[in-house]
Image (cartoon, helix red, strand yellow):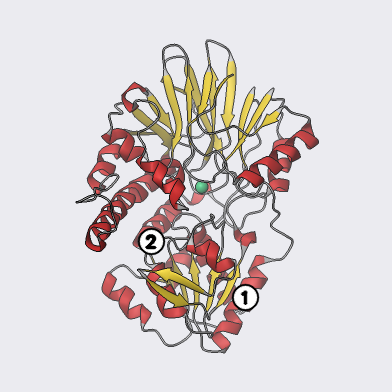
Amino acid sequence: MKLRFLGGTSTVTGSRYLLSDDNHRLLVDCGLYQGVKTLRRRNWAPFPVDPSTINAVVLTHAHIDHSGYLPALVKNGFKGKIYCTKATHELCNVLLPDAGYLQEEDAKYAARKKFSKHESPEPLFTEKDAREALKHFESLHYHETFEPVKGFEVSFTPAGHILGSSCVHVHHKGSDRTVVFTGDVGRQNDIIMRPPEPLQHADVLVCESTYGDRLHGESDPEAVLAEIITKTAGRGGITLMPAFAVGRAQMLLYVVHKLMEEGRIPDMPVYLNSPMAIKATEAFIKHHKEHKLDQSQCALIDDQTQYVRTVDEAIELDTMRYPCVIVSASGMASGGRVLHHLKTLLPNPRNSIVFAGFQAPGTRGDALVNGAQKVKIHGAYWPVKAEIHNLDSMSAHGDYNEILAWLEQGNLKPDKVYVTHGEAVASDTMRKHITEKFGWDTEVPELFEEVDI
Ligand SMILES: [Zn+2]
């Protein structure tokens, strides 16, 4: 069996890994590149192997950096099935058409502003392409073994990162070798997600390293958030939380309502301004057995949150002059409705902006948490006067200590580990941590490298 790294090397985006033998090709994850322009440009390069020669795709989870290239793959000739867990399927139903819509909007914007080299810039894929890709989906339960491609047996185990997220286990019958892709790995003690299930066997492990060189720290994120919201409200300001529509948005809403119920922050309206996050919240409530919150805790989110669905409602929200909390996507402020709020709220020192997850280099989120004095939004610069906070400890990714602890809980003796899904320094530091702790042969692969496993 061969493994080729088609993405997710020295970056946290564009996860794509190709497994093959003499007769078949199985792609694990099919993500979009995000962040700095040199990475985003890679989305436009021809896919490194002809999509029509790939027999099937398996997804670790729904996030766009793992699933977002699927509509382009189908558009360019992929004919097989796309396998994932049930919740991942449901979330992709929401995320992929939205990604297509955003691609179309970007192309229109480029045409209007004439900053594209092309006469009439085309989107990478459209909402219609995304709906076409969704017809290829087939969902399975965790721990159910299936054979997406002859000779490759696959199963999913919970990865604790977001709803439906999984580690993908692939057993190649011909060589009797098992490779496990961790996907994105969740926390040992997350507020809403259960911890990732320990891995029992892998000959080869492909491990993420988003926080390969960082720890989340000991501070209690609920207490920190309570203090920020209370102080901001005290000076008549608004707390804006840019959040990933799937995952952290639901967690933040739950924490805010819990703090309010416990009297740790003043009563005030809480808005969720992201049509996608609203749909993801509905899926989160429906699949309550897959996470820590019970039905009454889910009801707390649902009853107390004011969902902002239409653009008119969103514009009205921007004129708000009294304390409130707004959760809006996207989480790295790279697009979405949160940009409109930032334009209104950033120039005023009364307000607070709270990021709650990994900020990829090159994004506005990254610039803001690193102290930018102004940021460019919709072609103009906006001064940063609001307080900026980064609650890294609310991330949906385990830090390196949590991942090492999780690997130790299992029964692993891999003969090779490949570290992916991290910035270059983070991946290399993770490589050192794994080698030092377990003595396993560990490497950081290069883009397009192919290895015999
Ligand atoms: Zn993810």
Observer-nearest residue: 342 or 81? 342
Q: Position of residue 293 (x, y in %)?
A: 55, 56
Secondary element type, mark 2: helix
Observer-nearest residue: 102 or 298? 102
First in residue order: circle 1 vs circle 2: 1
Observer-nearest residue: 11 or 300? 11
For label 2, count other residues whose C-alpha is less than 10 Å away and answer few (under 14), some (14-19) or many (20+). many
Mark 2 — residue? 278
Classify residue 128 as left or right of residue 165: left
Q: Position of residue 303 (x, y in %)?
A: 43, 69
Work out how far the residue at label 1 is from the one at label 2, CA to CA, in angstroms: 23 Å
Q: Residue at x 43, y 69 (%)?
A: 376
- Callout 2 amino acid: Ile
Residue 63 in sight here: no
Q: Is residue 440 above or below residue 20?
A: below
- Callout 1 amino acid: Ala
Q: Residue at x 62, y 42 (%)?
A: 196
Quarter of the picture containing the C terminus is top right
Indicate which disc residue 170 carries: none
Residue 240 in sight here: yes
Q: Residue at x 58, y 46 (%)?
A: 160
Tell me which corner region of the image, top left, top right, bottom left or bottom right, holds residue 183.
Answer: top right
Mark 1 — residue? 226
Q: Is residue 87 above or below residue 445?
A: below
